[in-house]
Image (cartoon, grey):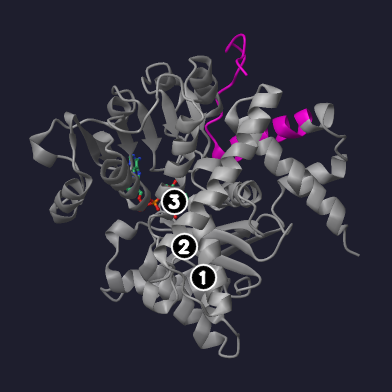
Amino acid sequence: MKPNSLSGIKEELDFLKRTRLEFEKAIQFIDAKVKPVESGLVKLLEQPFRQLTVRFPVHRDNGSIELFTGYRVQHSRLYEPTKGGIRYHPDVDLDLITALAFDMTLKCLIVDLPYGGSKGGVCCDPKKMSRSELDRLTRRYTYEIMPMLGPDSDVPAPDIGTDEREMGIIYDTYRMFSPQTPYASAVVTGKPLNLGGSPNRREATAQGGIYVLEEAVKQKHIEGLTSLKNAAVVILGFGNVGFNVAEILHKDFGSRILGICDSKGGVYSEGGMIPHEVLAYKNASAEQSVVGYNGLQHLDVKQLLTSPCDILVPAAKETQVVGELANEIKAKVVLELANGCTTNLAHEILINKDLYVLPDVLANAGGVTVSYFEWLQNKAGESWESNQVKERLQKKITTAYRNVAEIARNRDLDMRRAAFIFAISKAIDVISERGIFP
Ligand code: NAD
């Protein structure tokens, strides 16, 4: 669907407000064109059912005590357990975590996982903390949110600033306090393999996004892009998701990785870059950044976002693709692997330019999908082969893409609106089938 005019669209820079705006538009559409929506249901679906804020002390290595603030938000109990990552970042606050928990609810509905959405995080700068300080922070934060956690109540996973190491510590801390819980390793996903982690979890978000992209190319939904081979790619963010998307696209599809950036800046090379070499450079550099790789010129995020490419992959943080840049974006498709990366105004500008946008709630659902597989393996005491995980992931993600694309086609909508409508219609059905307690 193309708006006739962009005048009158107010850019919303707040992720939570933006999510609620898109939610309200989807509700209006369902109410007018699909089935009437009871007004009480709207609030029930929109508001988180539980929000916990904790303040806790951690000893720094120099002996001082620092107070940290952490959160855990459970958005919906359409299904239980709830599921969602844990973020360590200076921008973490209650609204951000609430928005991310809302997105998790939508994602699980879109890929058909029996989970409600949740999210957690601590306001801290992990880059300025030592390994042992981070370990103490993780143990204490886990203890503080323990009343919510459990394999059948709420299950965390990695997000920005956390990885397998934190997930292993969360599991160990939970286990110490719950020695009788059966299948306790299912309390957290994204664990190291030795602790019950799943093959392919680390690259799952990137892999899932690539399955979405592949299907869109196969179905000829992206104007001017008929193959991933030789496709020019620019990636914002070079952490877990950003590196893996670069690596898989380069290695498995022969795409050309022209631009990469992280929080310190970026680099662009018309000849393309080899992702694992860029990663080795970043890991060895004093700044832990891609800046300076191969003597390439330093670019800022704005320059990188607007560099020539076929596929633009935001894989860093929220609200980076904004209206003032959207007009200058030259890609054919935006694969949103970062949550909440595009503002409402930027989105309208992009689709008005006939650029295909694969929305975050669909494009980055591969992570929670393989987390679900890990949880199933832990509960069944099984360990699946890598190929089995990849095949099941591809099936889930491709089905989700087709379901959303069908709504977009039949109703003449963009993929973000279609994804929200798909998820919220299903949520309404689940509530009516479960009923309201008591
Ligand atoms: P990460 O911490 O491993 O990496 C984040 C990357 O973004 C780093 O390279 C960092 O330098 C970069 N970055 C941070 N601020 C930036 C800025 N202002 N400009 C440019 N780059 C910046 O995190 P991740 O796990 O790769 O997550 C990236 C995104 O993917 C997030 O939006 C996250 O919510 C989303 N996501 C992650 C998962 C997962 O399984 N890890 C699942 C679903 C969605």
- Earlier in the chain: of badge 1 and badge 2, it is 1
Question: Which amino acid is tagged 2?
Answer: Gln
Q: Which residues are magenta?
A: 1-29
Q: Quadrant of residue 232?
A: top left
Cβ of mark 3 under 8 A from ligand 1: yes
Q: Which residue is mark 3?
A: 205
User: Alpha-carbon distance for marks 3 and 2?
Assistant: 16 Å
**Residue 15 is inside the magenta segment:** yes
The structure residue drawn at horizontal position 66% and vertical position 66%, both measured from the top left corner, is 81
Q: Find residue 111 and report its horizontal and vertical position in percent.
A: 60, 49
| Kind of element beneath mark 3 | helix
* Of labels 3 and 1, the one closer to you: 3
Residue 227 seen in this snapshot: yes
In the image, residue 412 sits, relative to residue 91, either above or below, namely above
Label 1: which secondary element:
loop
| Residue found farthest to the bottom | 180
Which residue type does callout 3 highlight? Thr
- Of callouts 3 and 1, which one flags the residue occurring earlier in the amino acid sequence? 1
- The residue most toward the left is 295
Which residue is tagged 2? 388
